[in-house]
Image: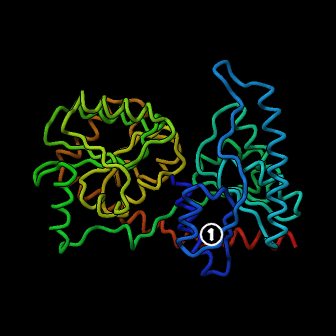
């Protein structure tokens, strides 16, 4: 489960408390399906596309575009049948793979459709498909202005930015009484009491550019600077193998790959700085969670990062691909304990003010109610 799925899972109970019940309709083999059921939420098994393949090395293949177009119509019919069966009032399409299908299904079932955009679309055909879905939908919600921008002109009146939010009670600074917990976890992650521990919370995927973090640490060249990478491989297992081997070769024991963690609030609390070199983003939840835990961040200036991090106040934002700047920014926080503390405190205040999940849920609830009112 990545950010978009966690977003929906966190939002569902809050919407339910507000009188809006979400029924998750997707293939049962997806992790989200099991997590949804475990949370006591209603599920419906529905055969939806897990991948879309319209390209090969030479570019877009017309025959594949035709095949996927037919597939979209068939999927839209299945969604529309499910909507009628469940007597749903509105369709929420949360994945880019289902945006167009969901928008078409709304027309067939005659119910409003709300699209949720979590990441930037690739230029070209992907953006054109997204624009078509936005035109057909009743309402579109983007997690950042950067994500919504490429389609805003297509149907701007129905596009609203609702920034990602986090549970600030779960993601909060560690208390002084938890110093033993912090020390034990730092030791587990390979950092001693006088080391500076960096955390990268991301899947092992080429778009996350973990190799840039490794290169930055190699450039800093200080053994007291440690890096722990929390995340599992994406579909590209070859990248994961390569980046782990590269890390071992370039910075050796200074890095640990710790896999999936269900205690990220404590992991962030045990760190000194949170780093992120992703280049394909919407509004990274991990950066908001880190700031909510009172930790400064260093991140590439991709998509909604500059909307979630206040440069020079809650963290440092670096031009994408500028490894020298990345290294210098990290080093400035490594050497500045007071700066880390000030940015961490400012980050917590920033999230409390602008990025609470309660505020996010309230805004989404109003969007849903408005769509249903307008349809009746």
Name the image quarter holding residue 7: bottom right
Q: Quadrant of the C terminus?
A: bottom right
Q: Where is residue 266 in the image (x, y as percent from the top left)?
A: 29, 63
Q: Farthest residue toward the front?
A: 29
Image side of residue 308 versus residue 42, left or right: left
Residue shown at 13%/42% (left/top)?
A: 224
Residue at the location (45% across, 69% down)? 167
Q: Nearer the viewer, residue 119 or 352?
A: 119
Residue 364: x and y, percent? 64, 68
Secondary structure of the residue carrying numbered label 1: helix
Vertical arrangement, residue 40 with respect to residue 256, above or below: below
Q: In which quarter of the image is residue 105?
A: bottom right
* Residue at 34% from the left image edge and 68% from the top image edge: 172
Total numbered labels placed on residues in the image = 1
Decide: is 22 above or below 284: below
Return the residue at label 1: 363
Q: Position of residue 102 (x, y in %)?
A: 77, 54
Whether residue 26 is situated above or below residue 204 in the rendered picture: below
Q: Looking at this view, is 317 or 78 the one in front?
A: 78
Q: Which colour scheme is used?
A: rainbow
Along the line of sight, which residue is nearer the eye, 264 or 155?
264
Task: Give left or right: position of 26 versus 349.
Answer: right
């Amino acid at each position: 489960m990545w950010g978009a799925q966690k977003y929906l899972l966190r939002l569902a109970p809050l919407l339910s408390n507000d009188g809006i019940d979400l029924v998750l309709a997707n293939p049962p083999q997806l992790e989200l399906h099991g997590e949804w059921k475990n949370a006591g939420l209603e599920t419906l098994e529905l055969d939806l596309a897990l991948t879309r393949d319209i390209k090969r090395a030479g570019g877009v293949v017309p025959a594949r575009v035709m095949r996927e177009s037919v597939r979209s119509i068939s999927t839209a019919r299945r969604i529309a049948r499910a909507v009628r069966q469940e007597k749903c009032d509105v369709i929420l399409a949360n994945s880019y793979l289902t945006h167009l299908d969901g928008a078409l299904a709304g027309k067939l079932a005659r119910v409003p459709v709300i699209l949720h955009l979590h990441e930037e679309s690739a230029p070209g055909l992907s953006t054109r498909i997204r624009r078509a879905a936005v035109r057909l939908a009743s309402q579109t919600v983007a997690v950042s202005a950067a994500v919504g921008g490429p389609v805003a002109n297509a149907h701007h009146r129905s596009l609203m930015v609702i920034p990602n939010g986090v549970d600030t009670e779960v993601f909060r600074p560690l208390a002084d009484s938890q110093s033993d917990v912090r020390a034990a976890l730092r030791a587990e992650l390979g950092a001693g009491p006088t080391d500076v521990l960096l955390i990268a919370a991301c899947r092992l995927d080429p778009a996350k550019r973990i190799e840039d973090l490794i290169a930055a640490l190699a450039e800093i060249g200080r053994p007291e600077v440690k890096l722990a990478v929390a995340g599992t491989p994406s579909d590209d297992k070859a990248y994961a193998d390569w980046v782990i081997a590269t890390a071992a070769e370039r910075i050796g024991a200074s890095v640990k790959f710790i896999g999936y963690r269900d205690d990220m609030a404590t992991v962030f609390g045990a760190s000194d700085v949170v780093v992120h070199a992703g280049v394909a983003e919407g509004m990274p939840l991990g950066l908001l969670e880190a700031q909510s835990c009172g930790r400064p961040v260093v991140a590439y200036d991709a998509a909604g990062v500059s909307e979630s991090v206040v440069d020079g106040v809650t963290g440092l934002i670096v031009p994408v691909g500028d490894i020298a700047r990345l290294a210098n920014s990290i080093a400035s926080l490594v050497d500045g304990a007071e700066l880390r503390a000030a940015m961490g405190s400012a980050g917590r205040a920033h999230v409390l003010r602008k990025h609470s999940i309660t505020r996010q849920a309230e805004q989404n609830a109003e969007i849903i109610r408005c769509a249903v009112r307008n349809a009746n």
